[in-house]
Amino acid sequence: MRGSILSKATVIAASSLLALTACTTDSSIENPPAAETGAAGEATPAAGEPSESSAEWFDQAVFDEQDEQRSATFEGDPAQPYLQYIDGEMTDTSAFAADGAQKACFSNASISNPWRQTGWITMNQQLQVLQDSGVISEMETRDAQDDDNTQISDIDYFIAEGNCDAFIISPNSTAALTPAVERACETGKPVIVFDRGVQTDCAVTFIHPIGGFAWGIDTAEFLSERLEEGDKVVALRILPGVDVLEQRWAAAERIFEENGIDAVDYFTGADPVEIKSIISDELATGDVQGIWMDAGDGAVAAIEAFEDAGADLPVMTGEDEMSFLRKWEETGLDGLAPVYSNFQWRTPLLALEKIFAGEEIPAEWVLPQSPITEEERGEFLTANEGMPDGHYAKFGGEDLPGYPTVWQERQIP
Amino acid sequence: MSVATGRSAVLEQNRSPRGERVLRALRTPSGAIFVLVAVLFVAVLAANPSFGEPGSLIRFIGRTAPIAIAAIGQYFVIVSGEFDLSMGSVVTAQVIIAGNLIGQDEARALPVLALMLVFGAFVGLVNGLVTTLLRVPSFIVTLGTMLALLGLVLYWTGGAATGNPADSFRQIGRGGIRDVPVLEIIPYPVLILAAVAAGAFWLMRRPYGRTLVAVGDNAQAAALTGAPVWWIRTRAFMLSSLAATVAGIILVGYAGVHPSVGRGYEFTAITAVVLGGVVLGGGRGWVLSAAAGAFALELLFTLLNFVGVQSTWRDSVQGAIIILAVGAAAQNWQRRRRTAASPTHDPNRPIEAPRPTPGTTEGGT
Amino acid sequence: MNRLTSTHIVYLVALLTVVAGTVLVGSTGRNFFSAGNISDILTGTSILGFIAIGQTLVILVGSLDLSVPYVISLSSLIGAGIMADQAGNILPAVLAALLVSALIGLANGAVVAGLKVHGFIATLGMGLIVSGYLGSTYQGSSGQAPLAFRLIGATGLGPVPVSTLIMLACAAVVLVMLNTTRLGHAMYAVGGDASVARMSGIRTTTPVIAAHVLCSVLAGLAGLLLAARLGVGSPTIGSQGGYALLSIAAVVLGGTLLAGGKGSLVGTLGGVLIFAMLDNIMSVLQINPFLKDVVRGIVIVVAVAVYARRRTVHRQARFGRTSTPPPGPGDARSGDDDGRSGRDAGTRDGVTA
C-alpha cells in the first residue's frame, strides 16, 4: 500500500508545486504554420497540403518549375556542384557575420539508409575542413532516428541548452517539423534547412537538389522513349507517405499514363527479398519490359529476378548507388541512374561559412541534379573504385580529407 | 525405451482405422492448417493457372524455404513456452556477415559459413541462458538481443555491407540442380528445407522433442521428472537461432545483402507458427504444421499479388485472415478442452490432443 | 516487510541512472538538472508513459497489445482531421478520436477474450488491419490542430510539460481504479489465473475487454498529444517511435509479470523514466544512433535480470508450497516464474504488501 499512497502523494505534491511556478509557453507556437503555407515556392508544397488521395501529390506548377530547372544554368564552378545554385532571390546575411569559430547544432532526421549514411560521412569530413580553418568550433548533432516527435524535442533541446550559434536541420517530415523550425528561427540565429523542406521561409536558406518531380520526369521519359505503348513497367517504391519519394512517383505515373505505358506499383521497404518475389510473380503472369524505382536500393535484386527467371532484361532506372552502377555495367542492360544529389550534405556547412562571413546566399539553394547516363557510367565507376555497394557515386567528397578510406570503410561517427 | 515399446503394442490394438485418424487429425488446429494451405493453393491456381506448373511450383517452394525454416526454428522455442524475437536480427546479422567477411574471395566461403553457424548457436545460447538462468522473460531477452545485435552489425558496417558475397556462396540460395525432368530445376533451398524439416520431424520424435513439449506444457511437472528444463529450453533457443542462420544463408543467396533483409522475420515466423496451430505458451502443436503455416502465409501473399489487391490494402487483408484463422483454431482447442472433464492433466483420461506421446505413431510431430 | 519489491528496485535503478546521468552529462560541461534538460526528459516520458500505462493493464490481464502504434497514428489523424484548425472542433475531434480508439480496443478485447486468440496474434493482426486502412486512406500528414490545442503540446509549468502532467493524472486515475475498484481487482485475478478467477465468480471476459479498451483509449490520447505537438496528424507517427515493443519493455522493466496477474503501475512509470533518461543521456553524449539501440537492448535485459531472480524466490515463498524445489540450476524456474502455471492470483507490489 505504501508505494501507491506515496506515488499519489508525490503526484499531488508535484502538481501543486508546479502550479505555483511560472507557466511557460513556447512563444513561436502562436504563429500557426498554416498561415505560412502561402510562402510556397520555398517548401515542397505538394507535400505540405493535407491530401486524401494520391492524385494530390501531383502539383502541376511545381512539376513545370522542376521540369524547367532540369535544363537551367547553374551559377558557380561545375567542378564544385555542391556550391552551384540556380540564380534567384538572395538572402542578405550581413547581420549574421561573426568573428572566430562558431558552434553549429545539427538536428538530423536519421542515418537509417545508405544514402543518408554516405551523406553523413561526407558532412563530417567537410566539418573537419571548416574546423581546421577556424570557421566552426564544433558541431553538436542529435539524431532523431526517423521520429518526428524526437526531432521536435531535439530542436527544443538545442534552443534551450545547446548554446548554438547556428542551426542546421534536416527535417524528418515536412508539416510536423514546421513549428519546431520556426522556434529555432525565433532565436535570431541563422537556420539552415536541407533535403526535405518545411512550410515556412523563416530559414536563411533551404538547400535541396531540384526535386522529386525532376527525378520522375528524367526516369519516366527515359523509359517512355525506349518502350512502346502498352508495354508493362513495374514500379518498385520504398514506402508511402514520404514527400520526396511520392513526388518522384507522382511525376512518373503521369508521364507513363500520357505515353500509354502500363505501370503497376509496389511497396517493397527496399527489401531485396520482397523485390525479388514481386518481380518473380510479375514474370510468372506475363512479360515485364521496364523497371522503375523510386530509389536504387535493391535494384540488383530486381535484375537478378530477371536473370533467374531466364527472362529478357528490362529497360531500367535505378540510382547512382554503386551496386546498381556495377550490375548495370556487368549485365549491359539499357538503363539510367537518376541522382538525388548526395553532395548536398556538404552544402549546409559551406553555407554556414558564407553566412558567418556575411556573404549573401540563395534563399532557396537549388543544387544541380542530373542523372548518370550510360556514357558517363564508366567514368563514375573508375572514380569510385573500391567503394562499398551502398556508396553513392555523386557523393562529391573527392577533395575532402580522409578520401577515399573514410568512405571505403564507412566510418560513421 | 522397452517400456514404450510395450505400451505402443497395446496402443496399436486400440487404434482406429487410418482414414478416421487422418480425419480426426485434420480437425485439430495443427491439422487444419493443411486444409488451409490446400484452399489457398486452389485459390492461387484459380487466379493464375500457370502457378500449378511443376517448374513454377518448385520455385515457389524454394522461395518459401527460408521463412518455413525460420518457422520451424521458432516452433522449438514456442512449443517450449517461450518467444524468440531476435530471429529477424539474426538473419540480418548473418546476411551482413556473409557479405562483409566472404566478399569476392571464394576460399573464405567455408570458414565463414562455419563461423556463421557458430555465431548463430552462440546467440541462441546467450538467449537461452539469460532466459533460463537469469530468469528474464524470453520476450524481453530476445527483444534486447534484437536491438543490440542489429545495432552492433550496423555500427560495424556503417549501415551497409561492402557488397554481395562470392557467387559460389550465393549459389546455396540462388542455384539448384538443373536439367531435372518435369521440374526443370530443383532449387537448393528446397533440398535444405526438406533436410531441415526431416531433421526437425526426427528430433521431435526423439526423447528431446518429447521432453521439449512436456516442458512447454508444464515445466514444473517436467522438472519433477528430472528433466534439465534450463538446458532443454536453451537448446530450443539455439535451434531457433541456427534456423535463422540457415534462413540468412539462403536469403543472402536468393536476394543479396541489404540491412532490410530479415526485417520483421520474427513476426512472420511467429505468425506462421501460430497459424500452424501451435499454441503460444507452449505444449501443443506439430513442427511440420509450423512449416505449413509459413506456406499458408506465403500463398496468401502470392494470392494478394495475383488477385491485384491494391498494395496499401494488403496489410488489412492479411491481418483479418490471420485473426480469423487463429480464432477458428482457438475455438477448436477450446471445444476439445471443454469436452474433457478436467482441463488438462487428468491421468484417468486419455490425452486426445495430438501431442507426441511415446509410442503412438499418430500425428507424431 | 523490509524486503525490496520490484518497484523499489526499479526506482533504485532509476536513481542509479540519475547519478550516471549527472556524471556523464556533467562531463560534457552541461547540467543534468537544467530546465531544458529536465523538460527534454519529461517530454520523453509523456508519450511512452500513456502507452505504457495502457500496456500495463493489458499485460496484467495476461494479454499484450501490439496494435498501439497504429491506434496512435489513426487517433492523431482523426483528431487533427476533424479539428481542421478550428478551436471549436476540439471537443468533437477528441471524442471521435477516443471513440474510434476505444472501438479498436473493444475489437481487440473481443478477439482475445471471446475467440480466445492470444493477445500477441490478435493485436498483431488488428495492427495490420489498421495499418492497411492508414496506408489506403491517408497519403502523408493530414489535418491541422488549432492553436489552442497545440498549446497543450508546447506549454509547460516551469520545466514540466503539461503533457507529462496529463499523463501523470491518467496514471493516478488508473492507479485508483486498479487498487480500489472491483474491475481493478478482477484484472489482477484474471491475469493471475483465469480458471481460479472464474471459479471465484468473476466474469473473466469483462476485465480483459476493459483492459484492451483502456489501453487503446490511452494510445488514442497519446496520438492526440502527438497531434498537438506536431500540429498535424501523421499516418506513420505511431510506428516511428517503436512504441509497441518499447512500452512492453518499460512495463516489464517496471516489474510487471509478462504473463499477467502481478505488477505495479508505479513501477511502469519508473521503467518509462529510465528509458527517457537513457535516451536523454545518450543524445547529450552524441552516441552513434546504431550504438544507442545496442545500449537500449542491453539495459532492458540487464535491468530486468537484476531483480528477475529474486522476485522468483519471493513468489515461491508466497505460494506456500510444500513441495521441495526441483534440483538443478534452471529448475527453480520451473515454468511459473513468468506465471504460466500456478500463478498467485491477486497479489501485487505495493498493494497487498
Image (cartoon, coloured by chain):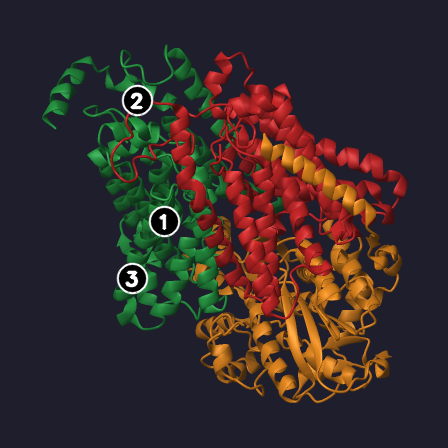
Q: Chain of mark 1?
A: B
Chain B is shown in which shade? green
Q: Residue furthest left?
A: B2
Distance of mark 1 from mark 2, alpha carbons? 28 Å
Circle nearer the N terminus (1, 2): 2
Q: Position of residue A51 (x, y in %)?
A: 77, 50
Chain C is shown in which shade? red
Distance of mark 3 from mark 1, alpha carbons? 25 Å
Q: Nearer the viewer, mark 3 or mark 1?
A: 3
Q: Nearer the viewer, residue B299 or B184?
A: B299
Q: Nearer the viewer, residue C53 or A173?
A: C53
Q: Residues within 10 Å of mark 2 (few under 14, many from 20)?
A: some
Q: Are marks 1 and 2 on the same chain?
A: yes
Circle nearer the N terminus (3, 2): 2
Q: Position of residue B309 (x, y in %)?
A: 59, 42
Return the residue at label 1.
B62
Return the residue at label 2.
B22
